[in-house]
Image (tube, helix red, strand yellow):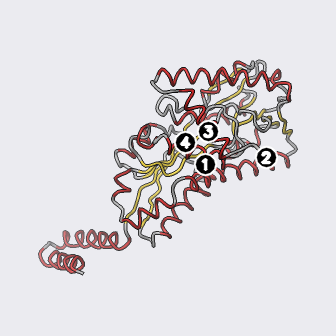
Amino acid sequence: MLAATLFFRSLINLLITASATTTIAAVVTALSLGNAFAHGVTFKAHHALPADSTVLKNFLEPWTRKIHDEAGARINFLMSAEDPGEAADAGFVQMAKDRNVDFVWLDLNDAATDFPKYSVFGLPLAANTSEGSSRALWAYVDINDLGFREFGKLRVIAASRHDAPLFHMRSIGIQSLSDLNGRKIAIPNPDSAALLSAVGASPIITPESSIGEALSGGTVDGTLLSWSSLATLKLEELVKTHTGFPAGVPSPYAETSVLLMNRDAYRSLADDLKRVVGGNSGSDASAWIGAVFDDGAARARQRARERGNAINVLPAGDLARWREAVKAVVDDRIRYLDERGLNGKSLIDEARELITEYDPVK
């Protein structure tokens, strides 16, 4: 009551004492501040997703609406975006640390340098669903306190591991690993280059935004992407065959994402609003993102069937060779992590155990 009285007293004083021009500006500002006080806080959320992204439409936007509603309209969001395809990595983290924005969504394709522990979940580790492995990733992030240790003391809201990538080819499909010999494969994740080279392919490291041009121009024979990414990048009409991996077999890599919040922004909230944000963070929020990827993958696969595209699985006879190539990649990452002063084997073993717990192969 006292605050309201003082607010309107100040407004009256402005009307009486200021010049006409200054008074109008002051009234607009004062009314805006009064409206902000009445409606709580407005957070800035930043991402680099396309406007029609399934993650944006089926997670970020409904997630912000859910918080808004549960907070009684006292938490609002102002969404902003980089051009799709821009690197959303350490620079985005710095934006959140500096509180130029309050929330950031990062798609992490090449995270080993800046986020070495987090990047473990991008390795070729066997998983069943994005929903389950995203729960496993959240548990890993929580156990290792990665918000503090790798994301600049930011608060981790949710973490996700995307659906598994597979080979999408322009014409001649992949029936076995020998079919990859000399084939040019566009890959957005440099970590998978060594693995593809080990099985005879010629990996071409290509930004996601350029893969469509590479496919349509014939400079590559195919690409290695998840079903959901193939749809998001609008590449479905450019490929004719698809080859994946049997259940329980490590995929070539995994895209990962994370939603981060500035800690001071969180601390500034009233206790009941902190509970709203906290209640929409963690394992369930991570699983929600994973479910969006799983649903997008299922729909993209169904569209491929309807187009008459061939959908293959690598034969059992190739799996020993594939696992050997995967082991070499994982062993190389263990050495890299050890050189960074981290226990690489322990981290990777922990990731595998969590995936087995939260995302068992059925």
Q: Amino acid at mark 1?
A: Arg
**Mark 2: few/some/many CA within 10 Å (<14, 14-19, 20+):** some
Find the distance from the CA under tag 4 to the CA under tag 3.
16 Å
Q: Secondary structure at mark 3?
A: loop
SS for dot 2: helix
Question: Which residue is at the front of the view, 41 or 144?
Answer: 144
**Mark 4 neighbour density, 10 Å: few (under 14) some (14–19) many (20 or more):** many
Q: Is disc 4 in contact with disc 2, using a CB cutoff of under 8 Å?
A: no
Tell me where residue 167 sits by quadrant. top right
The numbered mark, 3 or 1, whose residue comes first in the sequence reads 1
Amino acid carrying mark 4 in the image: Tyr
Counting residues from the start of the chain, the first of labels 2 and 1 encountered is 1
Q: Nearer the viewer, residue 229 or 126?
A: 126
- The residue under the point 80% across, 26% down is 319
- Tell me the quadrant of the picture where the N terminus can be found: bottom left
Instruction: Give how far apart the Cα atoms at labels 1 and 4 are.
Output: 9 Å
Seen at 55% across and 56% down, the residue is 60
9 vs 124, left or right, is: left
**Which is nearer the N-term, disc 1 or disc 4?**
1
Q: Identify the residue under disc 4.
A: 140
- Say which residue label 1 marks: 135
Q: Residue 117 versus residue 211: which sits nearer the camera?
A: 117
Give the side of residue 261 with respect to residue 291, left or right: left
Q: Secondary structure at mark 1?
A: helix
Q: State how far apart marks 3 and 1 are (Cα).
A: 15 Å
Residue hosting label 2:
301
Q: Residue at point 59% right, 46% down?
A: 160
Closer to viewer: mark 4 or mark 3 = 4
